[in-house]
Every structure is written in structure tokens, then in C-alpha cells.
């Protein structure tokens, strides 16, 4: 089972990233747990300077932008 | 299997670049069509009188809206391509180990080209100061990045011309450098929230490898994102501006927003700080105000206060800065903007 974390303090882009990620998970029929991390001290445990961030199984794969569905799908199925 | 050896990322750009070239040609053709089309629509299709108030306002609106939207799309694409070569991570690495002074200058300049959203101000602030970048240098970045943003510069270019756009960039840089230097001199480190210093920040992330195809894709994505976000402000701002253009008499504002009114600059800044708007909505209105006698210094000061010192960003920063440092930050930047406004009113 995949563990996915969306890092962000609740800005519009963070919500969009969460929605896109959930959509990809549903579209691909993956078993995954999508978590939202909003606490700054938790977020800063990853090497991140700009939100939103996307973490897949403990690995930070993207920061500061909203990747395309294709990119997210590639990370989730890697 | 020979074909699998060809890197698809290398094969792709030819088509993408051709696409960009076609788009550029269409852009130029459209751009040159706007003026005749706007005149035809206003005076022939709608039958408005040339020289009448309504006619002037409508023609102004029909010309400026497509012009600004086209300019925004084209310029943001170019700026976004440039920005794919920068990232907050790279900027932090470039600023690491720089002294005050040279560090402030570099930070302000990097503030222009580094992709930045004020919603990321907190992680960026923590990441910068934790890696040892001086507080004042960090502020130079945090002042320049929102003030000299791509939408503001492109709108100024479209409505005021390159001289004013250049003046805006130059004064934004100077304000960011000077305010950062002042904040650095005041030794305000203890007015940063304590948790920031105690935080364990993870090491640097490795940079991404981008192909030209990725860069074009990302630039196109940010054009769509920014235009979707600001077009409504552009339309409303230009509509208000067009109304002023047609209906407010010449030099009506010289008395209250002109050079003679010494208090107009601080009043414009005080009014601008709590106003939450973006450059897209404000610039068409101030451009129309200037036509009616408002002076350039006053107008630029107002714009900078609206764009660079926004209330939401200040509230976000309050999470990492204690009240006194917030006050010093706003006070220093506001003062710098006021002085710049006076300077322009004096020399121009």
C-alpha cells in the first residue's frame, strides 16, 4: 500500500495538488493512503523551500508546483 | 532494438519548438490586428461616435483588454522559460555564505527570477535563515520577489511603456536592498519566533534535470494558470480605467494626486498597504488616474504598497516573525516606498 503525503499549509495550490493526486489514485485503482500535512514543523522535515510538496513512500518527489497527472501517475507506479 | 536507444526527450523538442514558433507568429499577427479591430467594433459595428465619451471609453476597453491579455500570455511564457533555470533551492545555494551588502543585492535580483508564491513565504523563510543566510539578506529576497512580479512588470510595460516598467524594477530592487540592509543592521534575530531556530531542517534536495520539452511544458502551464487567475482583474480594472478615461475631466486629480500635494505619497502608501489586490486590477486604474493629473511618483508608490506589502503575506509571515519584527518590516518598506515616491515626483 502506498503512503502519499501532500505537504502544504492550506493554500489554493496545495488543495489542487491533493485533489489531483486523489484523482490519479482513483483512476489507476491504486491502494493508497493520502495524507495532508499542514503543520509547518512536520513539513520542514523534508528538504522543502516552496509548497506544495508531494511525498510518495517517504520520498519527496516534487516541490513548489502542481505536477501533471501523468507525472504523478509515473511516481505512484514506479 | 535500435529505436529504444533514442531518447524520447531528445526527439520531442523539434515538434514542440515548431509549435512555439507557430504560436509566436499567430501572436504577432493578432497583436497587430487589435487596434483596427477595436476601432471597427466600437465605431462601425456598435455605431458609437468617435470622440464621444462612451465611444472613447468603449474603444479604450476593446483595445486594452486583448492587448494586455496577449502581452501577459506572451511575456509570461518567456519569463517562465527563464524561471525554469532558477529555483528556491538554487537561490539558497547561491546566497549561502554571502556577506551583508553583496548578499542583499544578489538576493533582491534573484527575487525577480526565482519562482515564488507568497503562500510559500514561511517554508522559504525558515529554509533560508536555518541554512545561515543573514536575516537582512532573506528580507531583501522576500521584499523583491512579490513586488517585482511578472504580472506587474508586464502590465506596466503594456500600459505605461518600457521606461516606467524599468523604473519600477529599478526602484523595487533598491527598496528591497535598502530595507534588507536596514533590517540586517538592526540585529532583529531574537524577534524571529523561537521555534524557527530550533527546527531541524532536512538537507538540500537534488536539483531536477529538465529537458527543453519540460521547460516549454512548464512555461505553458504557468501561462494557463496565471491568465486563468488574473484575467477577471484585468477586465474589471480596464473597465474602471476606461470609465475614468472617458468620463473624468482632464487634470481633475492634479490637486489631490499631483506633485503639489505633498501628502499624497504617504496617503497613497497607507491606503495601499491594507488593500488586497493584485497588479492586474490596480495598474489599469492607476494608469487612467495618471492621465488625469496624478503624478508618477504617487502612482508608483501606491502600486508598490498594494503589490509588495500585502496584508495576507504579512499575516502568513506573522507565523515566523514576532510582532516587533513585523512592524519593523512593514515600517521600513513603507518608508522606502514613500521616499521613492517623493524622489520620482521631484525628478520627473
Image (spheres, coloured by chain):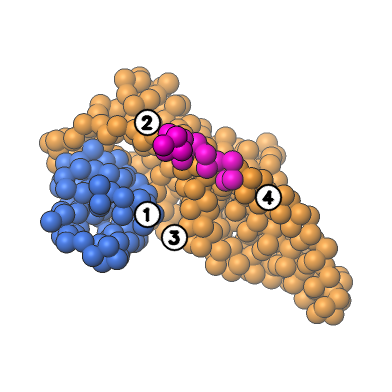
Magenta segment, prevailing SS (helix, strand or loop): helix
C-alpha separation, residue under disc 3 versus residue under disc 4: 38 Å
Q: Which mark is residue A70?
A: 1
Q: Which mark is residue B22?
A: 4
Query: Which chain does the residue under circle 4 lie in?
Result: B
**SS state under label 4:** helix
- Mark toward the start of the polypeptide (3 vs 4): 4
Instruction: Residue B186: give x, y in percent of width and height.
Output: 30, 30
Query: Which chain does the residue under circle 3 lie in?
Result: B
**Foreground tag (2 vs 1):** 1
Q: How many numbered discs?
A: 4
C-alpha separation, residue under disc 4 versus residue under disc 1: 26 Å
What are the residue bounds of the magenta stretch? Answer: B1-16
Q: Residue at x 16, y 54 (%)?
A: A2
Q: Is residue B9 magenta?
A: yes
**Foreground tag (3 vs 2):** 2
**Mark 4 crowdedness (10 Å alpha carbons): few <14, some 14-19, many ≥20:** few
> On the same chain: label 3 and label 1?
no
- Among the chains, which one is blue? A
**SS state under label 1:** helix
Instruction: Residue B243: give x, y in percent of width and height.
Output: 69, 70
Residue A22: in sight, yes or no? Answer: no
Residue annotated with mark 2: B90
Residue B287 found in image quarter: bottom right
Residue annotated with mark 3: B276
Amino acid at each position: 500500500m502506498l503512503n502519499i503525503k501532500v505537504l502544504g499549509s492550506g493554500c489554493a495550490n496545495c488543495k489542487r495538488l491533493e485533489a489531483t493526486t486523489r484523482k490519479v489514485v482513483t483512476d489507476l485503482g491504486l491502494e493508497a493512503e493520502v495524507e495532508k500535512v499542514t503543520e509547518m514543523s512536520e513539513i520542514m522535515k523534508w528538504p522543502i523551500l516552496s509548497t506544495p510538496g508531494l511525498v510518495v513512500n517517504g520520498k519527496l518527489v516534487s516541490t513548489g508546483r502542481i505536477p501533471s497527472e501523468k507525472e504523478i501517475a509515473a511516481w505512484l507506479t514506479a | 532494438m535500435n529505436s529504444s536507444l533514442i531518447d524520447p526527450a531528445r526527439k520531442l523538442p523539434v515538434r514542440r519548438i515548431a509549435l512555439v514558433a507557430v504560436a509566436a507568429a499567430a501572436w504577432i499577427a493578432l497583436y497587430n490586428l487589435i487596434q483596427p479591430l477595436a476601432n471597427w467594433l466600437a465605431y462601425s459595428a456598435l455605431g458609437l461616435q468617435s470622440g464621444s465619451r462612451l465611444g472613447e471609453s468603449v474603444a479604450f476597453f476593446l483595445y486594452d483588454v486583448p492587448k494586455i491579455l496577449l502581452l501577459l500570455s506572451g511575456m509570461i511564457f518567456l519569463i517562465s522559460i527563464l524561471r525554469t533555470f532558477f529555483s528556491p533551492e538554487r537561490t539558497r545555494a547561491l546566497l549561502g555564505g554571502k556577506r551583508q551588502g553583496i548578499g542583499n543585492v544578489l538576493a533582491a535580483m534573484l527575487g525577480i527570477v526565482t519562482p515564488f508564491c507568497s503562500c510559500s513565504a514561511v517554508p522559504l523563510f525558515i529554509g533560508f535563515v536555518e541554512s545561515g543566510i543573514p536575516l537582512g539578506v532573506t528580507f531583501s529576497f522576500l521584499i523583491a520577489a512579490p513586488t517585482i512580479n511578472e504580472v506587474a512588470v508586464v502590465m506596466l510595460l503594456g500600459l505605461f511603456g518600457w521606461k516606467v516598467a524599468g523604473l519600477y524594477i529599478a526602484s523595487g530592487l533598491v527598496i528591497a536592498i535598502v530595507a534588507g540592509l536596514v533590517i540586517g543592521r538592526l540585529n532583529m534575530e531574537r524577534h524571529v519566533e523561537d521555534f524557527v531556530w530550533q527546527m531541524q531542517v532536512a538537507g538540500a534536495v537534488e536539483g531536477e534535470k529538465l529537458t527543453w520539452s519540460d521547460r516549454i511544458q512548464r512555461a505553458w502551464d504557468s501561462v494557463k494558470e496565471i491568465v486563468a487567475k488574473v484575467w477577471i482583474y484585468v477586465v474589471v480594472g480596464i473597465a474602471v480605467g476606461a470609465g475614468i478615461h472617458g468620463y473624468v475631466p482632464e487634470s481633475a486629480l492634479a490637486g489631490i494626486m499631483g506633485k503639489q500635494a505633498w501628502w499624497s505619497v504617504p496617503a497613497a502608501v497607507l491606503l495601499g498597504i491594507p488593500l488586497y489586490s493584485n497588479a492586474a486590477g490596480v495598474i489599469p486604474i492607476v494608469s487612467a488616474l495618471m492621465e488625469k493629473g496624478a503624478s508618477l511618483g504617487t502612482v508608483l508608490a501606491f502600486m508598490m504598497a498594494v503589490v509588495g506589502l500585502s496584508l495576507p503575506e504579512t499575516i502568513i509571515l506573522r507565523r515566523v516573525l514576532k510582532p516587533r519584527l513585523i512592524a519593523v518590516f512593514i515600517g521600513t518598506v513603507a518608508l522606502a516606498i514613500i521616499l521613492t515616491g517623493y524622489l520620482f515626483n521631484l525628478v520627473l
